[in-house]
Amino acid sequence: MIAHEAGTGRPLILLHGFGVDHQILLPLDPAIAASSWRRIYIDLPWVRPVSDKPPSSTQEVADALVEEIRGHLGDEPFAVLGNSFGGMLARYAAHVMGEQVLGIATLAGAFVADAASRVLPLHQVIVADPDIVRRAERSATDYTELAVIQSAETLRAFEELVLPGLQRASKRVLAKIAASYALDREPEEAHPEPFDRPSLHIFGRQDQVTGFEDGLALRNHYSRGTFAVVDAAGHNAHLERPELVGALLTDWLARIDADLLEE
C-alpha cells in the first residue's frame, strides 16, 4: 500500500480518494514538509498493479490499512489525513488505533457512505473558461465534472495529478468495493466518546460530491476540530485553493506539535 515516503520527523499517513492514486495529494507536500513531518503516501488497492486477492469492500480496505500502518510504524505515534473516500478510512484508523493517533485531517471527506443520503449543494462553476475546457480535449468531461475553478492551473493539476490515477485504476476492483462501500459501522458511532486530539476538516463550499453539511454535523464529536468551508472550491479544494488549504494544514500540524510539547 505504501507508494511514496519522504522526509523525516513525525509520520503523517496520507490517503487519497476513490478511483485515483496518491499523486492527487502531492500538492500538499510543501506545506507538510515545511512543518518537518514525514510523509507516507498510500496507494489504495485499485491502483495497478493490483494484488491477486484485492479487498472486496471498504471494511476490508480499512482493516488492511490498519494492518499496513501497524506493520510499518509499529507503535510509533502518527497523524492521518484522508481525502474523499480516504476520509472514511482516516476516520476509521483514527478511532480504531486510539492513542497512537496524534490527529486527523479530512479533505473533502466522505462522512456519509450512501451518496443518495448526502446533503449536497448544487454543482456550481465559479470561474468558467470555455478555452480551458476546449484545451482539456478528451478529458474535458472528467475535468468539468468536478472543476469549480476552470483555469490553466487547475487543468494542469488535473492532467498531471488526477488523470493518471484514473487511468491506472482497476475498474474491476473499484466495482467490487463500490458494491460494499460503507464501513460496518461509522467510526463516530462505534467510538462515541469525543475525539479530543487536534483535527481539521476542510470542505469545498461548492463540492457536489461529498458536500459539507454531513461533516459539520459531527463538529461536537471532534472537540478539537477546525471546520473550514472554503468558498470557490469543489471536491478538489486543494487544487483550487492551494494557499488556503496549505495554511490550514500548517496550523493543524502546529497544533499537534504544541500538544506534544505540553506532554
Image: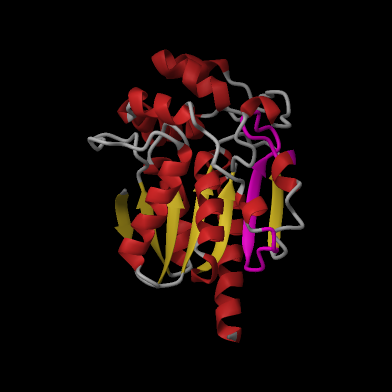
Please give the count of numbered marks on the rendered protein: 0
Q: What color scheme is it?
A: secondary structure
Specify whether residue 7 is in view: no
Q: Is residue 207 magenta?
A: yes
Residue lying at 69% horizontally and 58% vertically, measured from the top left? 192
| Magenta part, dominant SS | loop
Q: Is residue 217 magenta?
A: no
Find the magenta span and give its range.
Answer: 192-213
Question: Could you say which is closer to the camera, residue 191 or residue 36?
Answer: 191
The C terminus lies in which quarter of the figure? Answer: bottom right
Residue lying at 49% horizontally and 31% vertically, measured from the top left? 180
Q: Position of residue 179 (x, y in %)?
A: 48, 26
Question: Could you say which is closer to the camera, residue 227 or residue 234?
Answer: 227
Residue 181 higher or lower than 104, as above or below: above
Question: Could you say which is closer to the camera, residue 210 or residue 191?
Answer: 191
Residue lying at 61% horizontally and 57% vertically, measured from the top left? 248
Specify whether residue 103 is in view: yes
Residue lying at 64% horizontally and 37% vertically, measured from the top left? 112
Q: Position of residue 13 (x, y in %)?
A: 43, 57
User: Where is residue 255, by image quadrant?
Assistant: bottom right
Q: Is residue 1 left or right of residue 109?
A: left
Residue 7 higher or lower than 241, as above or below: below
Q: Position of residue 169 (x, y in %)?
A: 34, 29
User: Where is residue 84, by image quadrant?
Assistant: top right
Question: Could you say which is closer to the camera, residue 216 or residue 194?
Answer: 194
